[in-house]
Image: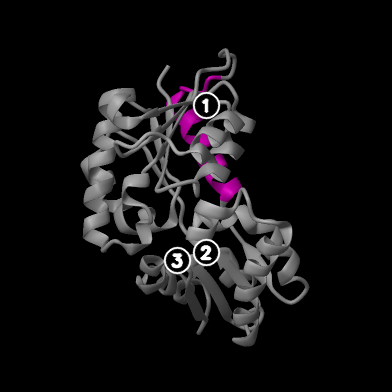
């Protein structure tokens, strides 16, 4: 059976992959963590689009996925259009920052977006806010250090440390007067409980996990390829780069119940 590909620079796409997998256990999944190019936020748009094109070409040759999910807001903004042109036969799903629902829900027209450097500097998020909110203002904060914290320290951080990270950013957004906050990087979903808790009652937090699962499920229905009665498939976690998997990736593979290997040796 052809798998569904979830692609991110690290662990950021795992909440999306895990949510879909729990609802669709019969669908085979390949999760590709591009640790060789982590973090994606540091790359220029053209560079990252070229990286993503090369990666998907490799995965197509190895696993021939039926759907690919860019489980990364930065990758989606940088490469989704180009990838759709390059791979017209492969349905691609992007994770767009949830600026539209945040803008529509805002009462004062001040939208906070927490993301990577590339996401914050791209006009895309402000264009969405302008489209759906009359005079809406976007306050963007780039948080590469938060991406690094979640990627390398999340599993060992205490609840107090996790809450403190969320609180620091929320204090900055609260000082700017925002009433809607978009978690504009998939990595930040690991702290969504902390963000929701610290944001209440004056700031509403928005993310896109459920919407992505629904979109993939609808594509499976359209393709007539949904594995409703299929046995539970073997799922794979692939890593880029020649180095042996770090202990944290071995733990993630065990947690997800996925086999673990290097992309170059898959």
Q: Position of residue 26 (x, y in %)?
A: 57, 20
Point out the residue furthest to the right here.
201
Tell me the tag on residue 258.
1
User: What's the residue at 57%, 72% (across, down)?
Assistant: 103
Q: How many dots with numbers?
A: 3
Magenta segment, which residues? 209-227
Q: Position of residue 212 (x, y in %)?
A: 53, 45
User: What's the residue at 63%, 87% (across, down)?
Assistant: 175
Ranked by sequence position, the earlier of labels 3 and 1 is: 3
**Local crowd at mark 3 within 10 Å, few (<14), some, or many (≥20)?**
some
Instruction: Say which residue label 3 marks.
Output: 144
Q: How is the image coloured?
A: one colour
* Side of 46 relative to 79 (left or right): left
Q: Is residue 227 above or below residue 153?
A: above
Residue 264 or residue 32, whichever sits in front: 264
Element class at badge 3? helix
């Amino acid at each position: 059976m052809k798998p569904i590909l979830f692609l991110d620079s690290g662990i950021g796409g795992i909440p999306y992959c895990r949510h879909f997998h729990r609802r669709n256990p019969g669908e085979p999944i390949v999760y590709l963590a591009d640790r060789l190019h982590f973090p994606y936020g540091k790359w220029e748009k053209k560079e990252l689009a070229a990286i993503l094109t090369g990666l998907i070409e490799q995965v197509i040759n190895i696993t021939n996925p039926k759907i690919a999910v860019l489980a990364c807001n930065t990758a989606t903004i940088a490469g989704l259009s180009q990838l759709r042109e390059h791979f017209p036969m492969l349905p691609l799903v992007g994770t767009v920052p949830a600026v539209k629902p945040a803008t529509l829900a805002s009462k004062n027209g001040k939208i906070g977006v927490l993301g990577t450097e590339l996401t914050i500097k791209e006009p895309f998020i402000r264009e969405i806010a302008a489209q759906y909110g009359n005079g809406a203002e976007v306050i963007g904060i780039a948080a590469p250090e938060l991406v690094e914290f979640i990627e390398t320290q999340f599993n060992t951080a205490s609840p107090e440390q996790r809450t403190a990270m969320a609180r620091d950013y929320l204090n900055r957004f609260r000082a700017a007067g925002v009433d809607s906050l978009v978690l504009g990087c998939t990595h930040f979903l690991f702290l969504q409980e902390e963000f929701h808790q610290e944001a209440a009652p004056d700031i509403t937090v928005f993310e896109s996990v459920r919407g992505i699962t629904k979109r993939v499920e609808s594509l499976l229905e359209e393709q007539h390829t949904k594995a409703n009665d299929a046995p539970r498939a073997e799922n794979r976690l692939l890593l880029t780069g020649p180095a042996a998997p770090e202990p944290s990736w071995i733990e993630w593979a065990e947690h997800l119940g996925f086999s673990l290997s290097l992309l170059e040796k898959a």
